[in-house]
Amino acid sequence: CLVEVLPESLELADAIFVYDPVFMGPRGAIQLQCAKEVRRPEGGLLMRDLGAIGVPMAGALYGDAVADGGDMFWLDERTLAVGRSYRTNKEGVAQLRRIFAQDGIDILTFDLPHALGPDFCLHLMSVISPVRDDLAVVYPAEAPAALLQELAVREIATIEVPAEEYPS
């Protein structure tokens, strides 16, 4: 396994969370657009650094599309789960569908709850986190019911986070 250490971005405090501004697909990196304005520059910087080490660019979101990588995870090699939230909008999903269609990838969308509102909105992976191909950690109180059903159909077992432990 090779680990590449990329240059620091001291002016961008959230840039340590590299899963949000760029998502990896079969053909390479996809530059996303974070909904939070303060995070918008991260995608371009990360794509530049990835390009410098030879990672190909497979696409980029543009215009009004927003999506955070924290709202996405692979259900299998050909199916991507995407949470629609305050951080991933309808146009972001539409553009991701066009990019991934080139690879025969299906996108299943799941609406996230309003919960505590836009300022506290969680990512899809804040309530469902895959551990391995057949296991996920789940906070069922805020998990999309349709996604819980999809996990069951795929025989992906779940470990539930108790309500009293979730805030920690």
Image (spheres, grey):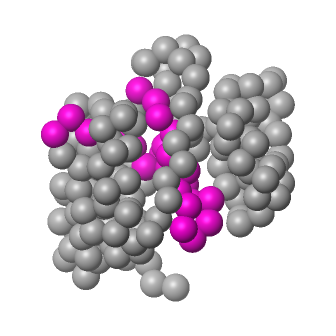
Residue at 49 percent of width and 14 percent of height = 117
Residue 28, above or below 63: below
The magenta stretch spans which residues?
Answer: 63-86
- In the figure, is residue 167 to the left or right of 63? right
Q: Quadrant of residue 163?
A: top right
- Say whether residue 8 is visible: no
Residue sitting at the far bottom: 1
Extreme residue in the top direction: 116
Q: Is residue 79 left or right of residue 90?
A: right
* Residue 150 belongs to the span the image colors magenta: no
Which residue is pictured at 35% across the width and 52% down the height?
96
Q: Is residue 98 left or right of residue 162?
A: left
The x, y position of residue 110, in whole percent, is 56, 37
Residue 105, can we see it?
yes
The percent position of residue 146, horizontal first and vertical second, equals 68, 37
Residue 74 magenta: yes
